[in-house]
Image (spheres, coloured by chain):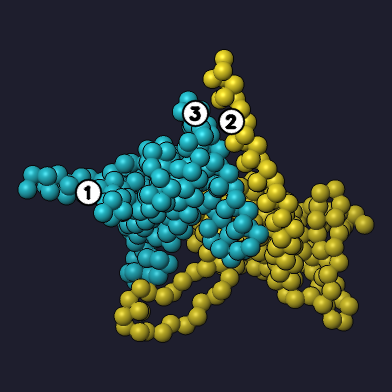
Chain colours: A yellow, B cyan
Amino acid sequence: MKDTMKFVITLLLVTLISAFVLSFLYSKVQDKIEAQKKAAENDAINFVLDDPAEIEKFEEDGLKYWKGTDKKGVFSGYAVLCEAPGFSSTIKIIAGCNEDGRIIKIKIIDQAETPGLGANMEVVQTNKYIWDFITGKKREAVSPIPFFQEQFFGKSYGELRVVKEPPKEGSGEIETLTGATISSQAAVDAIKAGIGKLLEREGSK
Amino acid sequence: MKVLKIIKNGILSENPVFRLLLGLCPTLAVTTSANNAIGMGLATTFVLVMSNVIVSMIKGFIPAKVRIPAFIVVIATFVTIVQFVMAGFLPELNKSLGLFIPLIVVNCIIMGRAEAFASKNNTFLAAVDGIAMGIGFTLALTLIGGVREILGSNTFFGYLVLPQSYKPMLFFILSPGGFFTMGVLLAFFNWISSRKKEA
């Protein structure tokens, strides 16, 4: 009996200290984490709308979207937050599009897919060889935009389709990431659903 | 002398991956590239050192029968602290290492060292053991990750190895390739150590 009490008290103390430390730390970093998420979101909106002069935010029934206007005050595009469950995380994307659903640019802002497979959706293509360190050869710079995301640029959201072979020119085909069909499909689904809902809402106004 | 022995233990004779066969789930999951492997290795090293230090400090107060749940709470607390601190203060690092942090919770090497070493030794030796095991783990992961990356995606640390027209063996990036690479390397290291014994 005496032993049992000792066990209970020890575990209680250990968990209490742990809970106290974690909640204290969380209250300290919470604001910082929120601020960083906000900054990342703002960067993404500016990126997908090609640096608009002004952004107006809308949030209704769980749909979060922004309207961008250029310097002359003319409407330049929508940005919408798209979400879909991927392989091991919720993939969050901000997609920019015009009134008839043609994608301007997209940016994946949050995902925790498998490193080396699904997580490659945020990886930039390379053309540098390891031997370049020895030979000293300089190579042209490649696109700083992750190759998976670049595929969506300029495509119409309704035509998006996941394929396993290199996509046909001018079609809405998106080539899957190697070994990560589920993650790739989820990204496409997220964008389709997100832009679909946005256009529905804006069309009904 | 003892310190040197602990370091040699962690890196070679008791290498967590190739000799103790501990922490294999994160090993197989993240070794798709050398960069990922190093990231996971460093994140694990940090948690390993911290949990070893704390466990060796509190070992006197924890009754033996409830030590395992107590150690698990300590480790989980550390992993969460690392996660918060990185997300709050090091956003760039968080982007590249953040993916691995939740995987550390399922890494039995941390529990293994808390139980086998830290709960029996003083704080200084426990810290040394944490560092040595961490380095051993990181080296092993980088080796597996490097092999899989070269064979599976024709890159090493993100740089191309063979001309791009060469189609790499995707098999090595997928999980069966992980088991395969791991098995072959394990056999290789066992062969070396058995030859040493005979000589």
Q: Is residue B123 visible?
A: yes
Q: Earlier in the sequence, mark 1 or mark 3?
A: 3
Determine the CA span between mark 2 and mark 3: 10 Å
Q: Which residue is mark 2?
A: A11
Residue B135 in percent (x, y) is at 37, 56
In-front residue for pair B68/A56 = B68
SS category of the residue bearing label 3:
loop
Q: Quadrant of residue B94?
A: bottom right
**Nearer mark to the viewer, of 1 and 3:** 3
Chain letter of disc 1 in the image: B
Q: Residue furthest right?
A: A205
Q: Which residue is mark 3?
A: B63
Residue occupying the point 74% across, 71% down = A46
**Nearer mark to the viewer, of 2 and 3:** 3
Does A142 appear above or below B190? Answer: below
Determine the CA span between mark 1 and mark 3: 39 Å
Residue A175 in percent (x, y) is at 53, 59
Chain letter of disc 3 in the image: B
Q: Is residue B119 left or right of residue A28?
A: left
Q: Which residue is mark 1?
A: B189
Residue A161 in percent (x, y) is at 61, 54
Residue occupying the point 86% across, 59% down = A58
Determine the CA span between mark 1 and mark 2: 41 Å
Q: Quadrant of residue B90?
A: bottom right
Amino acid at pointer 1: Phe
SS category of the residue bearing label 2:
helix
SS category of the residue bearing label 1:
helix
Badge 2 crowding class, 10 Å Cα cut-off, few under 14, some 14 to 19, many 20 or more, is some
Chain letter of disc 2 in the image: A
